[in-house]
Image: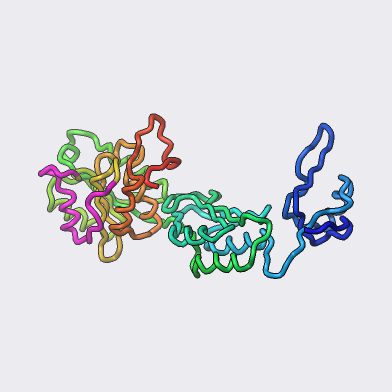
Amino acid sequence: MKLIKTSEAVGHVLCHDITRIVKDVEKGAAFRKGHIVTEEDIPVLLSIGKEHLYVWEKEAGMLHENEAAEILCKLCINEHMERSEVREGKIEIIAACDGLFQVDSKRLMAVNSVDEVMIAARHGNTAVKKGDKLAGTRVIPLVIAKSQMAAAENAAGAEPLLSLVPFKPLKAGIITTGSEVFKGRIKDTFTPVIIEKLKAYGIEVSEHCIVDDDKEAIVKAIADMRPKVDLICCTGGMSVDPDDQTPGAIKASGAAMVTYGAPVLPGAMFALGYFDDDKPIMGLPGCVMYAKATIFDLVLPRIAAGVKLNKMDFVAYGEGGLCLNCPVCTYPNCGFGK
């Protein structure tokens, strides 16, 4: 850094905070480290007694923190995100719409392994709303070598590290199974829960039917409903009891099974398959009806965004897949599914 006259400081970068004190009114930083001095700043600086300033002496091959933050931001952002103005070397990335937030964890770790750079993001595969903060970027020092930023760019690759996929306007069908509901012995309390959960993602339930615990009847209901909707939820009959027919019916419907069972509690008996047109069909265990957060809540944001899941997506749920049944549920602001 070097010491120069304040009157000659326009365009230079401050090397330290400058405090302004006004008795009974204000005490704080009038200018932050890294601020680039403008013509309008000169009278203010002189009024607080700064006749000279310590400024950064830019060297070849070095970048200011604000310049570096711009590079990191470009590594992260996609077309459904917005960004803040750069401030003190930091840029925040914000959701421009409701959708599924995703992180390429491997490449993010590679970038954060480069010395003196950092990108902090929220967990991936989570639902976010327009205006939610997604990530923040900055470098650690006031200035950083261009070679460090080139290393970060190389680690990131060509595609954005982060992705926001908008939720799609889908129509859903619900098939309620169970002789006790079909024969009117008990009221169907499962369907209203599913309708509310789907509504949170803008998914309209346009079809609903109730069938007996009969495999052929369930298969026929699936076949009748399939052309009318974008996804199907089957409720009831998901356990391993001999009279529970729903998993077998989903398999017999022509769907290619991704999984029957998941390393998640509550929700271990969940099933997911896809038809040849990529329409998903899910078998929902009874816990979805009464538990605050289950496997259905973890999977639904991906389904709502049209993202196809595979077997390894479910395998990965094992770490974080245990709900702790807290006395006051704070999901999704907890570790469940993360």
104 sits to left or right of 228: right
Q: Residue furthest top?
A: 327
Residue 85 appears in the picture as rendered: no
Q: Quadrant of the N terminus?
A: bottom right
Q: Is residue 72 above or below residue 25?
A: below
Q: Residue furthest left?
A: 242
Segment colored magenta? 239-263
Which residue is at a point 89% across and 57% down the rendered structure image? 7
**Residue closer to the observer: 87 or 115:** 115
What percent of the width, then of the height, locates residue 46?
89, 49
What percent of the width, then of the height, locates residue 81?
54, 58
Specify whether residue 131 is painted magenta.
no
- Kindly indicate the quadrant of the structure image that contains residue 229: bottom left
**Residue closer to the observer: 181 or 246:** 246
Q: Is residue 65 above or below residue 242?
A: below
What percent of the width, then of the height, locates residue 230?
32, 58
What percent of the width, then of the height, locates residue 115?
56, 59
Which residue is at a point 25% across and 62% down the rendered structure image? 275
Which residue is at a point 27% across and 60% down the rendered structure image? 274
- Kindly indicate the quadrant of the structure image that contains residue 289: top left
Residue 9 appears in the picture as rendered: yes
Which residue is at a point 50% across and 49% down the rendered structure image? 129
- Kindly indicate the quadrant of the structure image that contains residue 257: bottom left
Q: How many marks?
A: 0
